[in-house]
Image (tube, grey):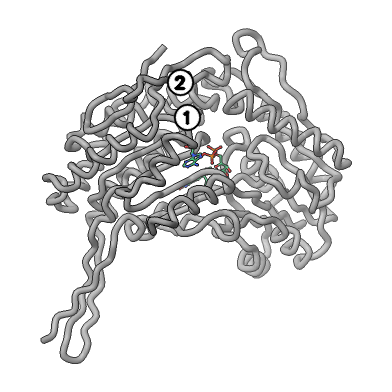
Amino acid sequence: MKTMPHFIGGEPRPSADGATFEDRAPATDLPLATLSRGAEADVDAAVSAARDALTGPWGDTTPEQRADLLDAIADGIEARFDELAQAESDDTGKPVSLARAVDIPRAVANFRFFAGAVRHDETGCHPMPGALNYTVRKPLGIVGLITPWNLPLYLLTWKVAPALGMGNTVVAKPSEVTPVTAGLLAEIIYDAGAPAGVFNLVHGFGAEAGQALVAHPDVDGISFTGGTATGAVVAATAASSFKKLSLELGGKNASVVFADCDFDATVAGVARAAFANQGQICLCGSRILVERSLHDRFVEALVAEVEATRAPGDPSDPATAFGSLVSPAHRAKVEGYVELARSEGGTIATGGRRPMLPAPHDAGAFYEATVVTGLAHDSRTATEEIFGPVATVHAFDTEEEAVAIANEVRYGLAGSVWTNDLRRAHRVAGAMESGMIWVNTWLKRDLRVPFGGVKDSGVGREGGRHSLEFFSESKNICVAL
Ligand code: NAD
Ligand code: 6OD
């Protein structure tokens, strides 16, 4: 079993009070690692190390030097690819095949992409009569990065790369549920040549280390990804010190299927949108709205697709496509929603049970991919974020009704539209109240585009120039001519 301390000032360091906590593998419920449990004193030490680094030689680095560091970190992730993929799978319960295909390649891509973005960044010049304005970007300063458990390395590196690229120093607080790859990333960042204190990592719980980081008076900005309720606490805590804030929060996303869709591709695409990573992606399409004339045929094909391709199994087996949920506690929450669906009058078309798996996976947090039909579209099951492998299917009669149902939730993160009518695709995509819409696809990512939500799904955008802008302060200089 691993012992994983914090990383402060470029060195592994235990908690000031010696406290630790245990991380378990959800697919077996066996202990995986013992981690230092951070509190205010550890956050203080990390912020102080980050401040020293900011005022040291790091503060004089050029964008080119920082871009070279990001590329070296990407090289370091590639060099430890197998270890990182297995660690991510062990810690989250996700199939190692998924970690190898998505999580770790995306961590590499995040560093390579932002290396290029920083190298090619430009600012504006606004000539006026008698004067010239030009804009320079300064680092924000010390940034706190707080991340969830579903895509641990993918989402942490999505923030670390632009933060370092723009010349900030970082204090990261990964999810206490899946902290292992963050510890490995700290080693990789220092092996790549980062100066001491540029990247600091404090492990621990949200109410302790996370809260201390958001409240810290010397932290200049917070980029937070997590649940909406937590986001509200983070926003309230950060407000009194006017920290710059980016909030990427929860979702309850609609997949809107019209009768003229490309049927087989849509069934496969909608199933992937609902159940990728065991349904534990903020972008997952867990409310499936189907034009009434196609509804019954679609449900039958969706159930067949799910049963054929998403049998839960050992995440370490390269052939497994559907792993365990992230923890027994999270499975209990998902099971509670399936009970709620039954009590709200839903029919379980497939799933709705714990699968029977041989030891040691009989102790794991596995749950079947579950499709529920017959629920009111405004039922609690169909409108609250479950963040697990449960999708509800609802029929609609008109385009207007589909848009109204899609928009009746408090969230506005993402959605997808499945149709061969190009004009309708544009109309519906435009009318859905979401930060991101895919048409005839899902989670196809271009790292330049704005990523983020509306309504209770968040505030602000990350990605491309949006990340560069968030992690810097733009300053105008006006020179009289
Ligand atoms: P969570 O909100 O419980 O935790 C997220 C992080 O916040 C963790 O590191 C946690 O320790 C920390 N935290 C908790 N309380 C805190 C506090 N008071 N102050 C500071 N930090 C605190 O979320 P989770 O259960 O880890 O992740 C699932 C949620 O994240 C879902 O709602 C999902 O939709 C959302 N999510 C959103 C996106 C997005 O890009 N919009 C991406 C992934 C996950
Ligand atoms: O693809 C991304 O950049 C991103 N931030 C994905 C978030 C997924 C949420 O679970």
At x 84% / y 50%, what residue is drawn? Answer: 376
At x 58% / y 23%, what residue is drawn? Answer: 320
Residue 210: % across, % down: 43, 39
Please give left or right for residue 419 compared with residue 321 in the image: right
Q: Nearer the viewer, residue 317 or 192?
A: 192
Please give left or right for residue 18 compared with residue 358 in the image: left
Residue 430: % across, % down: 61, 68
Q: Is the residue marked by circle 1 packed among few (<14), some (14-19), or many (20+) residues within 10 Å?
A: many
Given contact means CB atoms under 8 Å apart, are the residues at marks 2 and 1 in contact?
yes
- The residue that mark 2 highlights is 21
SS at mark 1? loop
| Cα gap from disc 2 to disc 1, whole angstroms | 9 Å
The relative height of residue 426 versus residue 202 in the rendered view (above or below) is: below
Give the quadrant of the N terminus.
top left
At x 70% / y 33%, what residue is drawn? Answer: 334
Residue 418: % across, % down: 67, 55
SS at mark 2? strand
The relative height of residue 222 versus residue 272 in the rendered view (above or below) is: below
Residue 264 occupies quadrant: top right
Q: Earlier in the sequence, mark 2 or mark 1?
A: 2
- The residue that mark 1 highlights is 176
Residue 164: % across, % down: 27, 46
Look at the image and tell me whether residue 113 can be seen: no
Q: Is the residue marked by circle 2 packed among few (<14), some (14-19), or many (20+) residues within 10 Å?
A: some
